[in-house]
Image (cartoon, rainbow, N blue to C red):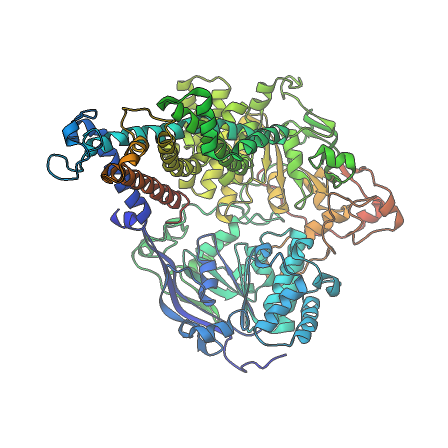
Amino acid sequence: MTARILANPPLAIGTLILGCVLALTLLAPLVAPYGVAEQSIPDRLQRPGGKHLLGTDQYGRDLLTRTLFGGRTALLLGLGAVALGLLFGVPIGLASGYAGGRTDEVIMRVVDALLSFPALLMALMIITALGASTLHALLAIGVANAPGIARIVRSQTLAVKHEEFVLAACAQGESHAYIMFGEILPNLLPPIVIEASIRVGFAILASASLSFLGLGVQPPTADWGLMIREARQYIFLSSWPLLCPGLALALTIVGFNLLGDGVRDRLTGRV
Amino acid sequence: MMSRQASGPALQIEHLSVSFETPRGEVHALRDISFDIAAGEVFGVAGESGSGKSTLAYAIMRDLAPNARVLGGSIHFAGEDVLRLVPDALRRIRGRRIAMVYQDPKSALNPSMRVGQQIAEVLEIHAMASRAGAAARALELLALVNIPDPLAVAHAYPHQLSGGMQQRLVIAMALAGDPGLLIMDEPTTGLDVTTQARILELVTGLRHDVGAAILYISHDLAVIAQVSDRVGILYAGEMVETAPATQLFRRPAHPYTRGLLDALPDIDLTRAFRPIGGRFPDLMDLPDGCVFAPRCDFVEDACTRAQPAMATVGLTHVARCRRWETVIATPPMPQARRSAPPLLEVTPPVARVDNLTKHYEEPGALMRWLGLARPPVHAIDDVTFAVHGGEVLALVGESGCGKTTLGRLLLRLLPPTSGTVSIRRRQSGAEIADDAEFRRVVRIVFQNPDSSLNPTKRVAAILERPLAIQGVSRPARRARVRELLEAVRLDVGYLHRLPRALSGGERQRVAIARAFATGPELVVLDEPLSALDVSSQASVVDLLTELRHRLDATYVFISHDLSLVRHLAHRIGVMYLGRLVEVGTVDEVFRPPYHPYTRALLSSIPVPDPSARAATVRLEGAVPSARLPPSGCRFHTRCPSKLGRVCEEVQPPLQRADGTHWLACHIPLENLRRERPVRPAGGTPQHVAP
């Protein structure tokens, strides 16, 4: 077992980082030394040490507490958006690849058109239409992820649909829906898992960007992107309000990327 | 041609042992292998998959996987131990003095380089010729491997050539360095029988022309018998018997060799056809004593206690068996069940195929409209036949003849371009129109169970599914699945296994059980045995025969293997390039009058008897493209007995030769009748009769 873990360091390190991040953010209400909205104006912009382990922000809120709670928003948005992307992308890609011919042609041209927008730009357009809120950020990033996922799923479907077991299913009278979801989809799980685990990191980054622009999570909710946005004005007074969420964000994304790489190596048999 | 040592073998292997380190343990791939090959000799190595054939080849090339370890022994080539050569010396030998021909010529050739250049490159790398000299020598080599029009071929790219031609090229490249040892690893396995016959002929010829020692590896004992001077039988990493070919096939001294011979379908129906029982041993956990003991008919207590020593059977004949004398003294297994002649009364047809045509059009309406699309592939052209209730109709032909397409048309998996397929119920004679009923009554078994079973589904789920579609209740399904497993002789413990945890033969049994789950009346068997090891083919044939009797089902058996067909079928339809060229009962097709193509097919089949070498009918050239099939008789481009213009211009109709025997040829029937039979009149088929 140890040998297998050591054989795939990205997977091991990624899992370790995300395990810590997940545990700390889930347990935030228990671990955090202060309340998430607890202000103390006399203690504003404190350096680390003393009563506040990582210092305080411009309202005197505890940075450790804010960072821990911000992780919840980040994970929720990242995982939620990718789940949403899968919800749309997988059936579209599966149907397109399975149907083939003109249907495939039409669906894929639409997907190509959507893919030609940068994902963040597309998310921005959706937010502009819907208005800024956490839910809308999740929707926007989720929808922006769907075309990429659809493309991957379609190409994998094309590879699997020519296997004889699909023909065997036709020969025993299975419905198209069963063949797609019952026969083909289980064989697509490895590439889907790989794709999803890499996308979560990008989704977290995208959600932080939206919040940074003021288009995602709204104050006073704790969110890393939002924290960075607010800390920007005080950067010459104290860099800690900026550093804490920034480092947390970087660490989490590195964690997801390592996990994605590791999962890919494991599932494609490279390690 | 080149200087060679006057005496001593070209290759001498002594006590070679190789194992692979895997995460699950050590795989003992080769153990204590010793043999030698003289210059100008062909040494055949035969064995089932997993026996270590390829590991042996790679060990001689010193090209083993990184996790392989040579545990001991030596490989002497031209006086030097290959295992001790420094990398520089090894590079000089590899590809030049020791050359290898692989199974798949397509992956051995560089697709982006002209053929002549590729051969010249070998010569230049080994500094054996100047640029100009290399080009000239390349042409010589192409001529040496019997390539017609070498100049044209030298300028072609590999994809422009047929599989047989590609394999000749690979052989030419191997010969470029004037090798002292040529290793051929299953060089004909992907090829059609008629092409295979020509390659085998080439190999036999090379032995005389080139004088290299040849190590010929194959799973097919019949092929080994055709080319080898001496033969080694490999089982689970051990050389269990080594003997001159004539000795080995006449007087096999090891029970495994006997088993392999019995497991081969015999086209002349003179031998037994039975499987080797038991399972191939786990190479990580080998049995104590003789490795073959758990599957051996001759096993006694002593066999399971200690490993037997190599026994000397004859001057150059050794076998790793303590009971070899008994084995030799035991008369060969007589043909198993001789039974009454097949299917006397003709029952009404359950399937009728009328003027069926299937052309595969290039997709893209725009290209068609612009006239830029390539012509359609003529997969099936104007085929008419009937399948009678309770019979086994075999469709035979080489790859690309349309037999698989025909099977899929029967199953309504493809829409026909024109013509009709109608399937009737056996009892009522009513045509099946309802789709659910059709799917229940007409079933198919595919060639390769690796791809026809969904790798993510467990056996229980695979077998329950067809029942669920037909609306069988869950408890009834469970019970039926157990019945099915028992019917295909698999353990109930297999229910929760994934396909990858089964052997090839077991997987095919699951696929068969799935086809029979709904109690079908017509089953299309699309090459159900060709992906299986020899040792399990006979048992699957037995199983199919038994199931047919039990269910009174009708089979359409699609195969390229006429030996199997002779064991299993009542009637045969021979196909060539989308057309049916001959139909008749097995006996009718196996004796004159023959369609010239059938005659070529029959005479190309290798038999495990070294004295029966050399095909009598050789087919020139490759199968023409199905996009532009030849005019007139489609076989006229390769027909050895072509009459003339009439063959090129007029398509011969199927005409009646005898009672149920039809063939499509312009040659007058009386001339065809006068030909000598290709195969001796054999016994009676053992599997067909009720």
Which of these two is toward me, B305 or A115?
Answer: A115
Would residue B484 be visible to someone looking at this image? no
Q: Please, is residue A133 above or below residue B176 in the view?
A: above
Q: Where residue B97 sits in the image (x, y, percent)?
A: 54, 73
Which of these two is toward me, B545 or A107?
Answer: A107
Q: Residue at x 67, y 19 (%)?
A: B431
Q: How many marks?
A: 0
Q: Residue at x 40, y 40 (%)?
A: B501
Q: Is residue B386 left or right of residue B256?
A: right
Q: Residue at x 85, y 44 (%)?
A: B666
Q: Where residue B479 sits in the image (x, y, percent)?
A: 40, 23
Residue extending farthest right: B645
Which of these two is toward me, B674 or B539?
Answer: B539
Q: Please, is residue B301 above or below residue A84 in the view?
A: below
Quarter holding residue A141: top left
Quarter holding residue B174: bottom right
Q: Where residue B498 sits in the image (x, y, percent)?
A: 40, 36
Quarter holding residue B569: top right
Q: Where residue B344 sits in the image (x, y, percent)?
A: 67, 31
Residue extending farthest left: A50
Q: Is residue B514 left or right of residue A47?
A: right
Would residue B635 be visible to someone looking at this image? yes
Which of these two is toward me, B283 or B391?
Answer: B283
Q: Residue at x 43, y 58 (%)?
A: B326
Q: Is residue A155 left or right of residue B659?
A: left
